[in-house]
Image: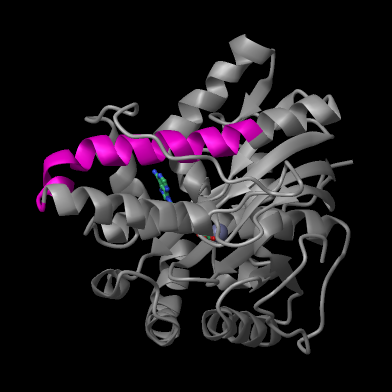
Amino acid sequence: MSKKTIHILAIESSCDDTGASVLKNNRVLSNEVAGQKVHAAYGGVVPELASRAHQQNIVPVVDQALKIANVDKSELDAIAFTRGPGLMGSLLVGTSFAKSLSIALDIPLIPVNHMQAHVLAHFIEDESQKQPPFPFLCMTISGGHTQILRVNSHEDFEILGETIDDAVGEAFDKTAKLLGLPYPGGPLIDKNSKKGNPLAFSFSEPKTPNPLDFSFSGFKTAILYFLQREQKKDSDFIKNNINDICASVQRSLVNILMNRLKLAAEKSGIKHVAIAGGVSANSEIRSTLKAMEKELGWITYIPKFEYTTDNAAMIGIVGYYKYLSKDFSSENVIATSRLDINK
Ligand code: KG4
Ligand code: ZN
């Protein structure tokens, strides 16, 4: 029996990137993202400016995604969109757009959980990615979340550990801000680290009651006090040591992540280990994870670069699985800023 070809248009607008993607079954035909430079001057995402920029971007980004995919609106089988978690005003732009288009084209509407999408990005059919077998471990590291999950199926996610305060991406971005680097600072810390000595400075690892949980708010404060102390001795301390500071901070954050992940693998006995989310674009977390293949016999899964930071293709792949199980929703569905990983 030949399988029906399904075209899904996916929309992502949970934070500060407006994304649209067209998938043909589990393959990506286009994956367009419009970033929002407007936040750089403020050192973080300004929610009101984000929703306004989404409103300006969404129509051209969707048009572009359809054009690149060479798919006409009339060929679409469903619209998938990010329902949450994320910034409410931003989510509302994508949600309203998706609802209107689904009504206009009379095709199903598929709400998607952004956190599930980061994980299931591994299942996008692409020559440069391999797909993990169930169960596998996935450490989702982004600007909003830090979780270690045991993934039992496409729809069953068990949280083994998570942050009790800030996300690791925030630790990168807030440290960058203290160093005078523009938002988002994570990629710049990564870049500067390549020229620095990771052993120049050391920062202690925060402890949590559940050893698989994370805590980054104390880490950020420790960096602040460290910089204040050093600047008393040398007012140009940051300027003179920027690369070493970045490399040392990055090494500490990667150690914190890897120590928890190793413990989760040891406790669960699972050797298939994946990372997902914006911070998995980090070059040191990528190389450290890869090194575990030789060191601990893990089989590791690192998403293709464009499927790590917020993108609509990952929303589309969840949409595809939900389409197969006819998991549609009515136009009464509402966006939600907080959303449990299994919802
Ligand atoms: O997944 P994502 O695009 O958005 C959220 O859902 O939060 O993640 C964004 C986060 C930001 O904190 C950004 O600084 C971080 O990912 N990031 C990085 C790198 N690239 C992006 N952090 C460290 N190194 C990178 N190369
Ligand atoms: Zn994200």
Name the residue at 31% across, 62% down. Answer: 183
Most distant residue in the top direction: 294
Q: Quadrant of the N terminus?
A: top right
Name the residue at 60% across, 53% down. Answer: 215
Q: Nearer the viewer, residue 191 or 66?
A: 191
Name the residue at 56% across, 49% down. Answer: 277
| Quadrant assignment, res 102 | bottom right
Name the residue at 56% across, 29% down. Answer: 127
Q: Quadrant of the C terminus?
A: bottom right
Q: How is the image coloured?
A: one colour
Residue 191 in view (yes/no): no
Q: Main secondary structure of the magenta part?
A: helix
In the image: residue 239, left or right of residue 191: left
Give x and y (percent) for residue 303: 56, 38
Give x and y (percent) for residue 342: 82, 60
Residue 80 vs 59, above or below: the answer is above
Q: Which residues are magenta?
A: 235-259
Q: Is 75 colored magenta in this rendering?
A: no
